[in-house]
Image (cartoon, grey):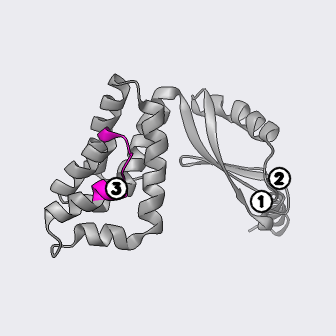
Amino acid sequence: MSQSIAAKRYALALFELAQQNGQLTSIQEELQELKKVFQDNKGLGQLLESPKLPLAKKKELLTDLFKGANQLILNTLYVLLDGKRMNEVIHFVDEFNTFANDSAGVAEATVYSTLPLTDEISQSISSAFAQKVGKQSLKIDNIIDPALIGGVRLQIGNQIYDSSVSAKLERLKRDLIGS
């Protein structure tokens, strides 16, 4: 989660526009792709922050790179560029997702497991834990971690629910040794 006030403000502005125009879902999906582009191409962010490249060239580059992108997203990128905030793009997308998820009653969760989760298991985890955090459902990101031995570890925000075998063994070890 980002701690950037600027990213939060830009995200809120785009979120409100997306809601007004009924484009919340499509913009959220496009922003995920945008985030991947900036994460996978660190040089792009550096290029857009470089004082050696004129602002007009940077805008032209954005227009060419994100041809076909929603105009609201493109306009937001221009505003970020004008405000010398291109280093905030990833944080901005994360903040937008937070606003969109909150409005839909969804929380993001990371589930660590030894094997990939089936849709059925993901759905049962979502329905069981969403209520615990006051949401309607969970958007689950599954990460494979063989060190768990078995079971799952679930992280929703700063809350962790650990029913992994490795955690149970660690608790048993502490109880037996007394440390």
Report, in whole angstroms, how far the alpha carbon at label 2 lies from the one at label 1: 9 Å
Quadrant of res 45: bottom left
Report, in whole angstroms, how far the alpha carbon at label 3 lies from the one at label 2: 36 Å
Q: Horizontal and vertical percent for residue 3? A: 35, 53
What's drawn in magenta, residue-wise? 62-72
Viewer can see residue 135: yes
Q: Is residue 65 magenta?
A: yes
Q: Which mark is residue 30?
A: none
Viewer can see residue 5: no
Instruction: Give the vertical position of 160 relative to 174 (above or below).
Output: above
According to the picture, the residue beneath numbered tag 2 turns out to be: 151
Question: Callout 2 environment at 10 Å: few (<14), some (14 to 19), or many (20+)?
Answer: some
According to the picture, the residue beneath numbered tag 1 turns out to be: 167
Mark nearest the camera among 1 and 3 is 3
Q: Amino acid at mark 1?
A: Ala
Whether tag 1 and tag 3 are in contact, CB under 8 A, the answer is: no
